[in-house]
Amino acid sequence: MLAEVKDLTKRFGKLTAVDGVHFSIPAVEAFGLLGPNGAGKTTTVSMMCGLVVPSGGDVVIDGHSILRDPMAVRRSIGVVPQDIALYPTLSARENLAFFARMQDVPTDTLAARVDAVLDIVQLADRQKDRVETYSGGMKRRINIAVGLLNQPKLLILDEPTVGVDPQSRNSILETLKELNRQGMTLLYTSHCMEEVEFLCTHIAIIDHGKVIADGTQRDLRLQAGNKDIISIQLERGAGDVVRDRLAALPGVDSVELRDKTVRIATDQGRSLLAGVISALDDAGYPVMTIDVKEPNLEDLFLNLTGTSLRD
Ligand SMILES: Nc1ncnc2c1ncn2[C@@H]1O[C@H](COP(=O)(O)OP(=O)(O)OP(=O)(O)O)[C@@H](O)[C@H]1O
Ligand SMILES: [Mg+2]
């Protein structure tokens, strides 16, 4: 494991913002920490970076404990904070050079590192412009570039797409996916299910300071017992005979039939569509519309907490 978060706890007065959080990040994974506003994501990652002192527990990254050897941890990680931390009146290049010196990037490689990260976030052509003249999405990209300066083994990103337009958001997510493909381990926090589903192979869901689900994306979908739901509208109402016929198809778990409306639960979703349509055709009940809904992390969150992830 590249990173292990062990029983991590943070109390602010009476509030336990992070309550015994436990997860492990395997090397070269993109790990998502998904949770609603106030769940404890920022507090968790701040403790992982050594910015907030834990009330209990420990974090071990690349073999080093954040409690015993925070400097060694900092050398292994790059951090992209939730709030943009840049000097507005300096150019992007000046900002990056400043942060590179702060991170002890060796002087003889500093210019090359700045060039490299500007290329990664695709802002080399704007590098001499002051950051205050940048769009929200461009500032976000420079914020990410800062996290990449020291060539970290683990890049920790705290909601790096908040407040950016959809196009910049996609470009950020694609950039991160490519970095991950090249072998960089990511810890990505978000309250946005779609982003985590797009980017992350492993996911921990956090709510009220506690991890309520943890596993691969596939594990989590199965964990809630979610099935794909195939919804069908027939041209005319059908009865038990049709229901039994559909229920007998391999891969079908259950069938609900009310007049013209059929709902089939299955693990096999799309691959079942052709068989369902032809079975109904054979029975003399042509399909008007058919639709598959695959279970997602939103459903899982709803099942576990009774509330929606969305605001
Ligand atoms: N320094 C602090 N002092 C007191 N309470 C705090 C402090 N920092 C965070 N909290 C509280 O801890 C809880 C968790 O906050 P945190 O910022 O970790 O959540 P989050 O999951 O990052 O939320 P968001 O998605 O809004 O960024 C919240 O109730 C917050 O008000
Ligand atoms: Mg936060």
Image (cartoon, rainbow, N blue to C red):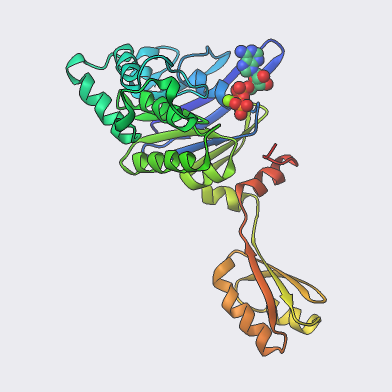
Camera-side residue: 175 or 227?
Answer: 175
Q: Position of residue 291 (x, y in %)?
A: 65, 67
Q: Is residue 58 visible?
A: no
- Position of the N terminus by quadrant: top left
Q: Which residue shows up at 31% across the image and 24% down it?
A: 149
Q: Which residue shows up at 29% across the image and 34% down it?
A: 119
Q: Which residue shows up at 21% across the image and 25% down it?
A: 112
Location of residue 103 by image quarter: top left
Q: Position of residue 116 (x, y in %)?
A: 26, 30
Ligand 1 sits in which quadrant? top right
Camera-side residue: 290 or 215?
Answer: 290
Q: Which residue shows up at 37% across the image and 36% down it?
A: 27
Residue 154 vs 74, above or below: the answer is below
Residue 276 vs 209, above or below: the answer is below
Camera-side residue: 186 or 7?
Answer: 186
Location of residue 181 by image quarter: top left
Q: Position of residue 296 (x, y in %)?
A: 61, 51
- Image check: 161 left or right of 101? right
Q: Position of residue 144 (x, y in %)?
A: 40, 28
Residue 17 vs 290, above or below: the answer is above
